[in-house]
Amino acid sequence: MCSTSRRGPPKEGSGVLDPYVPLVLLFALALAFAVFSVAIAPLVGPRRYNKAKLDAYECGIEPSPQPVIGGGRMPVAYYLTAMLFILFDIEMVFLYPFAVSADALGMFGVVEIVLFIATVGFAYIYVWRRGGLDWN
């Protein structure tokens, strides 16, 4: 038994862009929420200011004493840890496409992902041995 569906002429008002209407509405809702949040914050937020609130926040690390020229210096260990986290985090993002298309890649994909993980592992061991992960 063969069934055929006949489509009539396109309905008036329907267009090619109809599937994008929910996406546009979602972006409009997100924009409205962002504008509302920024506009209402000064009205409902606390108004008690003190010296601690006005100081620059550096993740709880106190700056070292003032040098002769320039401002206070921050320990470099915080920034090194942050850069290493970003580096390894971005490298791990590359594992996601492999996980999505593992079946299509076959053995070639497995060999490539093992080489990639070995490279990241060697970089991790190098940073660990050089003391980049020690917080002293």
Image (cartoon, rainbow, N blue to C red):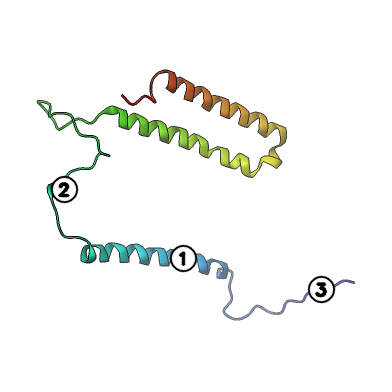
- Amino acid at the residue labelled 2: Leu
Residue at figure coordinates x 14%, y 33% from the top left = 71
Residue at figure coordinates x 53%, y 25% from the top left = 121
State whether residue 88 is above or below residue 40.
Answer: above
Residue 108 in the image, given as x and y percentages of width and height: 69, 32
Instruction: State the residue position of label 2.
Output: 54
Tag 1 near tag 2, CB within 8 Å: no
Q: Residue furthest bottom?
A: 12
Residue 63 in the image, given as x and y percentages of width and height: 19, 32
| Left or right for 17, reference 104 | left
Q: Tag 1, which secondary structure?
A: helix
Residue at figure coordinates x 63%, y 44% from the top left = 100
Instruction: State the residue position of label 1.
Output: 26
How many numbered tags mark residues here? 3
Question: Which class describes the residues within 10 Å of circle 1: few (<14), some (14-19), or many (20+)?
Answer: few
| Left or right for 116, reference 47 | right
Tag 3 near tag 1, CB within 8 Å: no
Instruction: State the residue position of label 3.
Output: 4
Q: Which mark is residue 119?
A: none
